[in-house]
Image: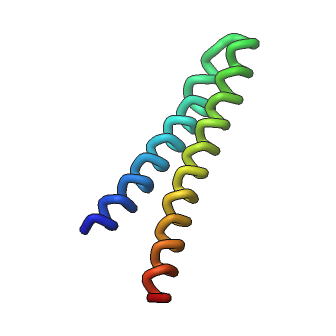
Amino acid sequence: MKTVAANARFWIAGTLVALAGVALARVVAPSLGSPARLYCTVGGQLLAFGGLVLLAYGVSRRVRRDGESAQS
């Protein structure tokens, strides 16, 4: 049960961070003026990418842990 909670934590956090980045880049940025739009779009894209990296990190931890338990 502990591993399920650890996996879910990364999936939920990564998904929320990525969705917040997409919302920032696609919903908030178009309503802003010229210089702020650029910063908001880039920030949202970086936030979305960070969420995907967080998801990938959680999956790699699970794969590494499953590989270690299979060897023992």
The vertical placement of 1 against 51, above or below, is below
Viewed as shown, does residue 42 lie left or right of 9?
Answer: right
Q: Position of residue 7 (x, y in %)?
A: 39, 62
- At 40% from the left and 51% from the top, the residue drawn is 12
- At 54% from the left and 50% from the top, the residue drawn is 54
Q: Position of residue 56 (x, y in %)?
A: 57, 59
Looking at the image, which is closer to me, 30 or 47? 47
Q: Quadrant of the N terminus?
A: bottom left
Query: How many badges with numbers are in the image?
Result: 0
Q: Residue furthest left?
A: 1
Viewed as shown, does residue 23 lie left or right of 6?
Answer: right
- At 75% from the left and 13% from the top, the residue drawn is 34
The vertical placement of 22 against 64, above or below, is above
Instruction: Specify the quadrant of the image occupied by residue 42.
Output: top right
Q: Position of residue 47 (x, y in %)?
A: 60, 36
Looking at the image, which is closer to me, 17 or 61? 61
Q: Position of residue 30 (x, y in %)?
A: 64, 23
Viewed as shown, does residue 11 lie left or right of 60?
Answer: left
- At 64% from the left and 14% from the top, the residue drawn is 32
Looking at the image, which is closer to me, 67 or 4? 67
